Amino acid sequence: MAEEFDDIITLIDEEGEEVDFRLIAVVEHEDDTYLALEPADQDEDAEETEVVFMLVTRDENDEDCYEPVTDDDLNEALFERFVRMMEEAQEDGDDEKEDE
């Protein structure tokens, strides 16, 4: 089930600049956990949404670390899972409205 998140995650880009992302979903895939993120400054009315996937790992201090997904096949699989999650959430929301 998809969850609503308002969490902002600040990451460092290739140039060393801070970039804010909004957490939009947590995606489980093959025993790993990934975050689906969108740029925090992205226009909510945009027709297409940019989604970035980050693998959640732990460092030696048991702190969360985020690694970008660079494998095209994995990105595609994660995106397909993400779309299914969003569709299921939409269907669940539609079902709840019908019950009211």
Image: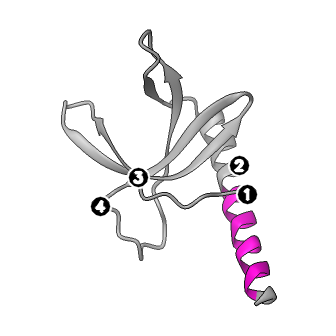
Query: Closer to the N terminus: mark 3 or mark 4?
Result: 3
Q: What amino acid does circle 3 point to?
A: Asp
Closer mark to the observer between disc 2 and disc 3: 3
Tag 3 residue: 7
Q: What amino acid does circle 4 point to?
A: Asp
Q: Position of residue 48 (x, y in %)?
A: 48, 66
Q: Is residue 71 above or below residue 77?
A: above
Query: Closer to the N terminus: mark 2 or mark 3?
Result: 3
Magenta stretch prevailing secondary structure? helix
Q: Residue at x 59, y 45 (%)?
A: 26
Q: Badges 1 and 2: C-beta atoms under 8 Å apart?
A: yes
Image quarter of the C terminus = bottom right
Tag 2 residue: 81
Residue range of the region highlighted in magenta in the rendering: 83-97
For numbered disc 4, what is the local secondary structure?
loop
Q: What amino acid does circle 1 point to?
A: Arg
Tag 4 residue: 41
For numbered disc 2, what is the local secondary structure?
helix
Q: Is residue 23 above or below residue 4?
A: above
